[in-house]
Structure formats: C-alpha cells, structure tokens
Image (spheres, grey):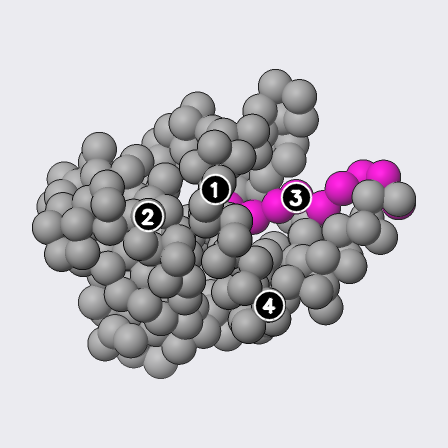
C-alpha cells in the first residue's frame, strides 16, 4: 500500500496541495480529458449525479455542463473550500464531507456516479466501488478515472510506494469484485503522456436489487 493510501495522510497532503491544485492539475488532468470522459458517461439533462472525491470542483464544473442536479463529496475540507468559492455550498452544487468507502446516501439515490483523481487514495477501492453500486439505480453508469500503471519498472516501484496505480486487468478485478458488469476502459492523457490516466465506465446490473 502506498504512503498516500491512508486517509489521514491524504487529508494532510491535500491541506497543502489545495493551495496550488488548480494550477497544477491541468498538467495531469485537463479540460480535453474531462470532456472525453464526460462523453463516455452520456448524462441526461435531469440526471442526479454524485462527484466522489470532487476536490476543488474541476470534475464538478464539467458535470454541470450536462445536468443541473450535481452533488459533490470529498474528505478534504481544504479542497472543498476551493469548490465552495466557485459554486457555493448549496447553490449550484450540494456538497458533503464524507468517505468514499462509507457514502452517506440511501440505496438508489443517484442516476450516475463520477469520480476522477480519487481512487488512488482509497485504502479499500473495492469497498468504495461497492458503495457506488449501492447508491446508483440499477442500469446506471459509474465512471472512475485513475492513474494508469506505468510501463517502466523504475516508475512502477515509485508508483507502488506512493499510491494506487493500476492497469486494465486490475480494474476489471476491482469492478468485478464490487459486482459490476459491462466494464470498459479508455486510456487518456495530455500530449506528453497520452496514456497517463485510465478511465473505466461500468454499469450497475439491471437486476441488481432483485438478488
């Protein structure tokens, strides 16, 4: 487990990163990548969507281009304070401070879940994905963007020491263990590294609540 796959360390990390996050983020996760991922999610105008690990609201901003019913959750109050200045606490977006592995919502509360740049910090990603499955209506989409596993053995060792990096096979395993089907992956990234991120789109099984 990487050093930042610990909730208290991740909160401390983002306490300081939040000061420059919006300036640093475009070098790793930019508007073009966000737009490509949003097209995969294929939201309807009245969909109720939760942005898990919303941070300063970069993904949230993109979601608002597709639906007005957007909700954001993050464990870092320092990151969310940046989002509050953009959207208000309950104006354009309803924000919640919470844990991806224990979401404070009832079953079938949302039409879709989006999560970008958050899975790498979860100590138990399968538990969080199972929570996504629980709160999304049967048949609804879940989209997760995370860091693609490096091809270089040197960078692999570095990645493993910091946080969760994973490839398509590992994503398949995690989503299958969480009970998803119809799982598909797309790699994307800025020009200097077009495969830096792995985007996974999955659906909650249609008969999920009948089991």
Question: How much space separates mark 2 and mark 3, taking CA atoms?
Answer: 27 Å
* Of callouts 2 and 4, the N-terminal one: 4
- Mark 1 against mark 3, which lies toward the viewer? 1
What mark, if any, has residue 9 been given in the picture? 4
**Distance from label 1 to label 3 (Cα)?**
20 Å
Image: magenta residue range: 145-153
Disc with the residue nearer the chain's start (4 vs 3): 4
Establish if 14 lies above or below 82. below
The answer to the question of whether label 2 and label 3 lie on touching residues, with beta carbons closer than 8 A, is no
Residue located beneath label 2 in the image: 82
Which element carries disc 2, helix, strand or loop? helix
Label whose residue precedes the other's in the sequence (4 or 1): 4
Between tags 4 and 3, which lies in front?
4
| Residue at image coords 46%, 45% | 19
- Give the quarter of the figure containing the C terminus: bottom left
Q: Are marks 2 and 1 in contact (CB under 8 Å)?
A: yes
Helix, strand or loop at disc 4? helix
Q: In the rendering, at what x and y percent does residue 31 appear? A: 41, 27
Label disc, if present, on residue 32 of the rendered structure: none
Classify mark 3: helix, strand or loop.
loop
**Residue 196 coordinates in the image, percent (x, y):** 64, 35
Q: Looking at the image, is mark 2 or mark 3 nearer the viewer? A: 2
Mark closest to the chain's N terminus, 2 or 3: 2
Residue 114 drawn above or below residue 29:
below
Residue at numbered disc 1: 21
């Amino acid at each position: 487990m990487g050093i930042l796959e610990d909730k208290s360390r991740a909160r401390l990390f983002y306490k300081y990163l939040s000061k420059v996050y919006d300036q640093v983020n475009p070098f790793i996760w930019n508007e073009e990548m966000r737009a490509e991922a949003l097209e995969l999610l294929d939201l309807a105008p009245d969909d109720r969507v939760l942005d898990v690990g919303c941070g300063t609201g970069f993904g949230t901003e993109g979601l608002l281009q597709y639906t007005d019913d957007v909700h954001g959750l993050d464990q870092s109050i320092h990151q969310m304070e940046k989002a509050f200045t953009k959207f208000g606490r309950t104006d354009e977006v309803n924000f919640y401070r919470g844990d991806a592995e224990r979401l404070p919502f009832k079953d079938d509360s949302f039409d879709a879940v989006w999560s970008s740049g958050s899975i790498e910090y979860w100590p138990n990603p399968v538990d969080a994905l199972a929570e996504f499955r629980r709160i999304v209506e049967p048949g609804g989409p879940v989209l997760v963007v995370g860091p693609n596993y490096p091809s270089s053995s040197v960078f692999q060792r570095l990645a493993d020491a910091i946080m969760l990096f994973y490839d398509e096979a590992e994503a398949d395993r995690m989503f299958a263990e969480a009970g998803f089907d119809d799982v598909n992956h797309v790699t994307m990234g800025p020009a200097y590294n077009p495969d830096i991120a792995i985007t996974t789109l999955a659906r909650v099984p249609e008969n999920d609540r009948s089991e």
